[in-house]
Amino acid sequence: MNDQPGVSRRALLGTIAAAAVAAVGLTAGQSFGWLAPLNVFAPRVPGRGPQGVPVNTTAASAGVVETARAADWTLAIRNGDRAETLDRARLLALPQARSTLPIACVEGWSTTAEWSGVRMRDLLALVGASAGATVLVTSLQPRGAYRRTTMGPEFAQDPDTLVALTLNGETLDLDHGYPARVIAPGRPGVLQTKWLSSIEVVPA
């Protein structure tokens, strides 16, 4: 017979409930500004961060500091045997568009910012992509689940979908995706690829 005191079902459920309440309380500052002082485990607060936008993954943690700052950085746009290679100066020389869009994170925060850059559909037109094309977007990140993402034509052809070069009127901060990043309406933050390397039309 085991004489060790057991843990009652009521005590166990009480412990689980208390832990859940504590976790919610300590992260609620992401969604409710007045609770920000309690935001211990997830300290990203809307409105705070470079250029007024929070950062989940920094350039350092993504391993792109050197490649993103490289003087010879270029963005490759490919559609089969047609290709264009654009540096930042050439991207800035193309017609620029502005979009005021929210960016939402799976961690629970969202914020709206003003982005400017080249429309994705204009870049795809440079290589003769069809209006129905799906594209593969690749980051400079050497690894990670979201270093490559696909974008359907409903996003690629949207006039608000940009290869963004500025944020809130300033050159993109390195942690926000400098030298260029994707921003598109209706896509979660993890799919708004930062530190772009290439955009490639997926063969039909």
Image: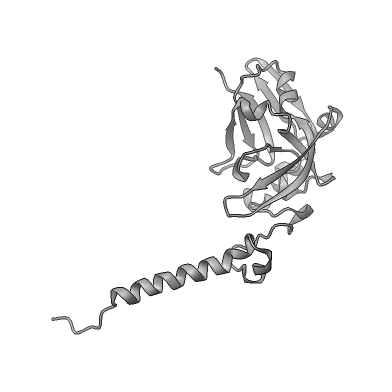
Image quarter hosting the C terminus: top right
* Residue 177: x %, y % from top left: 71, 44
* Residue 24: x %, y % from top left: 53, 66
* Residue pictured at 63% horizontal, 61% vertical: 30
Relative placement, left or right, of 117 versus 76 is right
The one nearer the camera, 175 or 95, is 95
* Residue pictured at 45% horizontal, 73% vertical: 18
Q: How many marks?
A: 0
* Residue pictured at 28% horizontal, 77% vertical: 8
Can you tell which quarter of the image residue 197 is in? top right
* Residue pictured at 23% horizontal, 83% vertical: 4
Relative placement, left or right, of 7 versus 158 is left
Question: How was the colour assigned to the protein in this rendering?
Answer: one colour
* Residue 80: x %, y % from top left: 62, 16
Is 196 located above or below residue 103 in the figure?
above
* Residue 113: x %, y % from top left: 76, 47
Image quarter hosting the N terminus: bottom left
Can you tell which quarter of the image residue 81 is in? top right
Q: Residue at the left extreme?
A: 1
